[in-house]
Amino acid sequence: MTDEYAFADSIFVARDPEYVYDLVSDITRMGEWSPVCKKCWWDEGDGPWVGAHFTGRNVTPARTWEARSEVVAAERGRTFGWDVAGGMVSWRYDFAPADSGTTLTESWTFHEIGRQMFRDRWGERADAAIKDRVDAARSGIPQTLAAIKITAEAD
């Protein structure tokens, strides 16, 4: 999936899908892998299941912000995904058996509601801010996948 506001990439991980799922669905570890998301924490009592909420802290050279997310897909060994800030952005990981490991796919979609929020908030600067988010996802997803692979295969 590649269009202006959506992107996905995949990597082979030499671990089984359930193992990779357990690693990725522990969102408290996302800060170890992502070049933008530096820390995540679950709402009290929540965990990696549909309807759970967590907050992520993101850092770029231009700014730092936090966003609350809701888990919208959680099927061990198959898929784990969340919507950010009421559906402005969606992130998803898919886990497919491959040879003696897993094809791990990370996908990102920047929905119209999110782009409209950028327009409302930043006015004339919105196009540049939107481009920054798109560019960050396109460069960050391969970096995140590579870092997850290193962690998974080192364990």
Image (spheres, grey):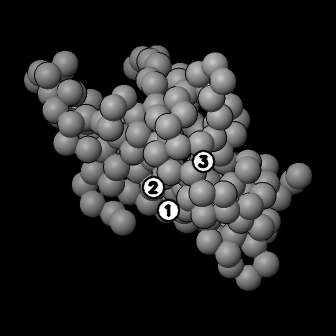
Is tag 3's residue or tag 2's residue first in the polypeptide sequence?
A: 2
Residue type at mark 2 is: Ser
- x and y, in percent, of residue 103 in the image: 63, 70
Is tag 1's residue or tag 3's residue first in the polypeptide sequence?
A: 1
Residue located beneath label 2 in the image: 107
Looking at the image, residue 103 sits to the left or right of residue 92; the answer is right
Looking at the image, residue 151 sits to the left or right of residue 122; the answer is right
Crowd class of label 2 (few under 14; some 14 to 19; many from 20; radius 10 Å): many
Residue located beneath label 3 in the image: 144
- x and y, in percent, of residue 82 in the image: 47, 42
Looking at the image, residue 127 sits to the left or right of residue 109; the answer is left
Q: Quadrant of residue 100?
A: bottom right
Residue type at mark 3 is: Thr
Badge nearest the viewer, 3 or 2: 2
Disc ID at residue 39:
none
* SS for dot 1: strand
Looking at the image, residue 78 sits to the left or right of residue 115; the answer is right
